[in-house]
Image (spheres, helix red, strand yellow):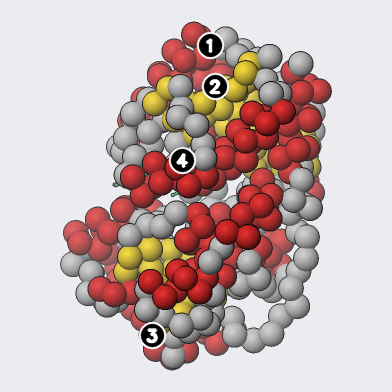
Amino acid sequence: MKIVSLVGARPQFVKEALINGAVRQAAAWDHVLIHSGQHYDVGMSDAFFTELGIPEPKYNLGVGSGTHATGTAAVLVKVEQALLQEKPDALIVYGDTNTTLAGALAAVKIGIPIIHIEAGIRQTPMSMPEEINRRLTDHSAMISEGLLCCCSQAAAENLRQEGIVKGVISSGDVMYDLFCRMRGRFAPADVIKDYGIAGGEYIVVTLHRDFNVDSKETLQSLLKGIRALAYDAKLKVLFPVHPRTRKRMAEFSLSRILSEEDMIDPVGYVDLMSLVSASAFVITDSGGLQKEAYYAGKRSIIVMPDTGWREITDAGWNLLADPTEESLLRAGKAIVTTVPYPKHLYGNGNAVADIVECILRRFQ
Ligand code: UD1
């Protein structure tokens, strides 16, 4: 049995690390890895392969950055070629990126079943690029008679409401498995020493969504709001800056709102989780990080109109905020209150084993 796995962006490398490791360990099937090249900076790509021990991909499509159409189309054409050459039993795609959608479209059109890991996540507005990608990928996976692996019952229910039932499994979250396996390697004391900060006295910030960083007014108001919140809470800011955000800050002349020492280059999984573990809380628009912070027992202010990880906000653990000073200051006051920790929202740390078993049962 042969399965092709397609990755392209940071969160997908993290998820692939575990699936890849489990498949190799059990010699479960012939696993062919394709990297689309959507993320290509060393700190956004190679660093994850090295740190998480992911083998060199058989194909690197080198598509790089572009508009949604150019990026998606380039992956679509090149993945189709690879799939025609490899003739796999199924294609694994992860999450909600343009790489995910392109892989799903290529596979469904040539009759290759799609295994969508992190299926059934839904958030508004439906016009968000990631939401478009999720919906089209899930529906392609259903049409292809593949597998839709959900992190929670709520995600499976979202699919049921769209008429997708067959092939749906509730496996739990692969990223929770990774957190459980890697937590022994987190070294908060060492990492914070490198940045000259003290535990509990800083906020980890990450921002990269188009609606937050591509408009000068929004990005300015967001950065000023974060500065005001940090001042009010007497906390420092530690902000690993996504290259997209770095470019926009330079283009809009907004690089001086936060101090130079607050802003660092993107960091790998272990360092980021170490930083989060010793932080006061997190401000982010990343789907992955809001969930990983929750695993580390930290709360997040999510600068988004909605989140796909509603179980955590419904429990009052994570809070949504607008990109304004007023909203961020309000969230900053609320995030330091005590809220009971909502346990076991996304499985028991055995998602990878469940997914591998379901794939074997379905395709062997
Ligand atoms: C993408 C995903 C998003 C995911 C995120 C994780 C889509 C539509 N979005 O967003 O779902 O949460 O990855 O990080 O697929 N850039 C570089 N170097 C890189 C990568 C990106 O300079 O290695 C810059 C380029 O200017 C690029 C921009 O960042 O145009 C945006 O990159 P892109 O991959 O399109 O989207 P992300 O914002 O990273």
- In the image, is 178 to the left or to the right of 272? right
- In the image, is 364 to the left or to the right of 333? right
How far apart are labels 2 and 3 at the CA level? 48 Å
- Residue 291, how many percent across, how many down? 61, 59
The residue wearing badge 4 is 49
Give the image quarter of residue 260.
bottom left
Q: Amino acid at mark 2?
A: Val
Q: Residue at x 64, y 86 (%)?
A: 337
Q: Residues within 10 Å of mark 4 (few under 14, many from 20)?
A: many
Q: Residues within 10 Å of mark 3 (few under 14, many from 20)?
A: some
Residues tagged 4 and 1 counted as in contact (Cβ below 8 A): no
Of the numbered discs 1 and 3, the one sitting upstream in the chain is 1
Q: Amino acid at mark 1?
A: Glu
Which label was assigned to residue 150? none
User: Which is more foreground, mark 2 or mark 3?
Assistant: 2
The residue wearing badge 2 is 32
The residue wearing badge 3 is 228
Of the numbered discs 2 and 4, the one sitting upstream in the chain is 2
The residue wearing badge 1 is 86
Q: Residue at x 76, y 45 (%)?
A: 350
Give the image quarter of residue 355.
top right
Q: Amino acid at mark 3?
A: Ala
Residues tagged 2 and 4 counted as in contact (Cβ below 8 A): no
Between 5 and 319, the residue placed more toward the observer is 5
User: Which is more foreground, mark 4 or mark 1?
Assistant: 4
Q: Amino acid at mark 4?
A: Phe
Secondary structure under tag 2 reads strand
Of the numbered discs 4 and 1, the one sitting upstream in the chain is 4
Residues tagged 1 and 2 counted as in contact (Cβ below 8 A): yes
